[in-house]
Image (cartoon, rainbow, N blue to C red):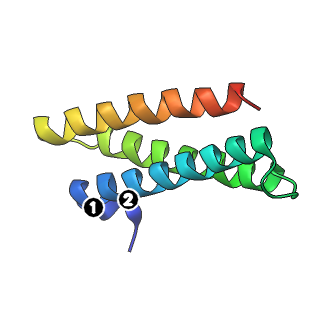
């Protein structure tokens, strides 16, 4: 089944899950970089974090681009795009 054929609530839920996971991984990477709890390279973790945030952002954009979208889902996807965009910008600039 294609992702574009899924209903809007499922796509928004997956966008939230991917975005939140990316934000948590990015935060863990920043905390470990500052305090040095684990002596491991944080580059791969940063990459996975950014990838998950981009994927969550793309799912929210895909919901917004659907035709005949109810106002409720349009507002939720716009908020999701704003939050994930700001988080992505923060993590990119913090590298």
- Please indicate whether residue 46 sits to the left or right of residue 81 in the image: right
Contact (Cβ within 8 Å) of mark 1 with mark 2: yes
Mark 1 surroundings within 10 Å by alpha-carbon count, few (fewer than 14), some (14 through 19), many (20 or more): few
**Residue at the spot 68% in from the left edge and 55% down from the top edge:** 48
**Quadrant, the C terminus:** top right
Please give left or right for residue 60 compared with residue 39 in the image. Answer: left
Judge whether residue 32 can be spotted in this image.
yes
Seen from the viewer's position, the closer of residues 35 and 49 is 35
For numbered disc 1, what is the local secondary structure?
helix
Count of marks overlaid on the render: 2
The residue lying at 47 percent from left, 55 percent from top is 18
In percent of width and height, residue 8 lies at 24, 54
Q: Residue furthest bottom?
A: 1
Q: Quadrant of the N terminus?
A: bottom left
Residue annotated with mark 1: 10
Please give the name of the residue rendered at 31% of the width and 31% of the height, measured from the top-left corner: 78
Query: Which residue is depicted at the point 39% across and 63% down?
Result: 3
Question: Closest to the observer: 28 or 55?
Answer: 28
Answer left or right for 59 relative to 30.
Answer: left
**In the shown orientation, is residue 66 left or right of residue 32?**
left
Spatial separation of the CA atoms under disc 1 and disc 2: 6 Å
From the top left corner, tell me how far across and down residue 59 is, in percent: 42, 49
Q: Position of residue 13 (x, y in %)?
A: 31, 57
Mark 2, secondary structure of its residue = helix
Question: Which is more toward the observer, 10 or 4?
Answer: 10
**Residue pointed to by mark 2:** 14
Mark identifier at residue 53: none
Instruction: Please tell me how crowded label 2 is: few (under 14), some (14-19), or many (20+) other residues with Cα within 10 Å.
Output: some
Q: Is residue 68 visible?
A: no
Residue 38, given in percent of the width and then of the height, sits at 81, 58
């Amino acid at each position: 089944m294609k992702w574009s054929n899924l209903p809007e609530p499922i796509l928004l839920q997956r966008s939230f899950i991917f975005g939140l996971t990316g934000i948590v991984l990015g935060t863990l990477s920043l905390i470990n970089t500052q305090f040095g709890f684990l002596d491991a390279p944080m580059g791969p973790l940063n990459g996975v974090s950014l990838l998950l945030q981009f994927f969550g952002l793309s799912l929210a954009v895909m919901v917004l681009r659907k035709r005949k979208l109810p106002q409720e889902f349009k507002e939720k996807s716009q908020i999701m795009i704003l939050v994930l965009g700001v988080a992505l910008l923060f993590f990119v600039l913090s590298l």
